[in-house]
Amino acid sequence: MDGKKLEAFVKAVDLGSISRAAIALHLTQSALSQQITSLEASVGVQLLARSKQGVFPTQAGRVLYRHAQHLLRGMDEALMEVRARGDGPSGRVSVGLAPYSLAQSLTVPLLQTVRREYPNIVLHLRENFGGLISEGIATGQIDMGIMYSPVSLRAVHVEPLFVDELSVLAHQKRKLPSPIGFAELTDVPMLVPTRQHSIRLAVDAGFQRHDLFPRIAGELESVPSLLSAVEKDIGCTVLPGASIPDLAQHPTLVRLPFAEPMPIRLAFCISANEPLSEAAVAVERVLRRLVSRVLAEHAGVGG
């Protein structure tokens, strides 16, 4: 099967548009359409359905898309390995880091360490919802991930790392009680992630246990943006302890523990079926080392 035609098909599915896929691949729209038409002719079935909103895969297209991801990634890794110079593992490694996890503390150190110790490895960092990371690991698109309360999938091995505790982060001028109960939060504007996120699910469940409803002022996925919004007193938020920065650097903010336990599990995830490549094993060692260091620092601050 022609790799360029597969790449054209995958890009069209990813972007949901022939025109955007053509731009991304530096092709004319006509040339990309011809490649996909040729691919459909070679497999004998329609792969893409077209609508006013763009394109989307047919049932047969979804099957090919899943296999094409593996094929294209394998081709990329083979080329990197062939072209790599010097000793040591080489190839592309994908790591998923869920927002509100240790992403802020790990991203730059992981890039720096892998670049220094394994210069022939290309690191692909994906910050996304835990559920999407779990699915990516199950389908082979992501090698490993760190997330809170990962989605349970048979194809994903979950290794608990740490049980964190959720806390409320608020502007000090609100003068909220500490510890705080959900009843005291019902009239407070809340800044939280979307319902796809495990932390939002935990917050919603906490309110529901008391037959209460949160007052959602906004949905944000970025911790730095959340901190800025809370510092401007747009609302309060809920964060795991490991994601809360040194409040000495944010003197207007206060951390309020919940009156009832609000634990949330941080986990390391890899495929339960497919072994890691040599390059992925090397990155895993680095990642585990950095996670241990970050959690030790967190425990020291918390203690």
Image (spheres, rainbow, N blue to C red):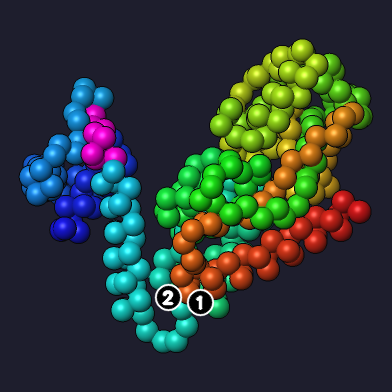
Q: Is residue 103 left or right of residue 184?
A: left
Tell whether label 1 touches label 2 (CB within 8 Å).
Answer: yes
Can you name the residue that lies furthest to the bottom here?
A: 86
Q: Quadrant of residue 170?
A: top right
Along the viewing direction, whichever of 165 and 177 lies nearer the viewer: 165
Q: Residues within 10 Å of mark 1 (few under 14, many from 20)?
A: some
Name the residue rendered at 15%, 58% in the picture: 2
Q: Quadrant of residue 109?
A: bottom right
Along the viewing direction, whichever of 204 and 174 lies nearer the viewer: 204
**Residue 73 rendering spot, x and y as whole percentages:** 34, 60
53 relative to 13, above or below: above
- Labelled disc at residue 118: 1
Specify whether residue 159 is painted magenta: no
112 relative to 141, above or below: below
Q: Is residue 38 left or right of residue 138?
A: left
Which part of the image, by quadrant, shows the C terminus? bottom right
Name the residue rendered at 54%, 71% in the picture: 281
Q: Does residue 128 appear in the picture of this structure? A: no
- Labelled disc at residue 90: 2
| Amino acid, disc 1 | Tyr
Q: Quadrant of residue 185?
A: top right
Q: Which residue range is magenta in the image?
A: 54-62
| Amino acid, disc 2 | Ser
254 relative to 214, above or below: below
Mark 2, secondary structure of its residue: loop
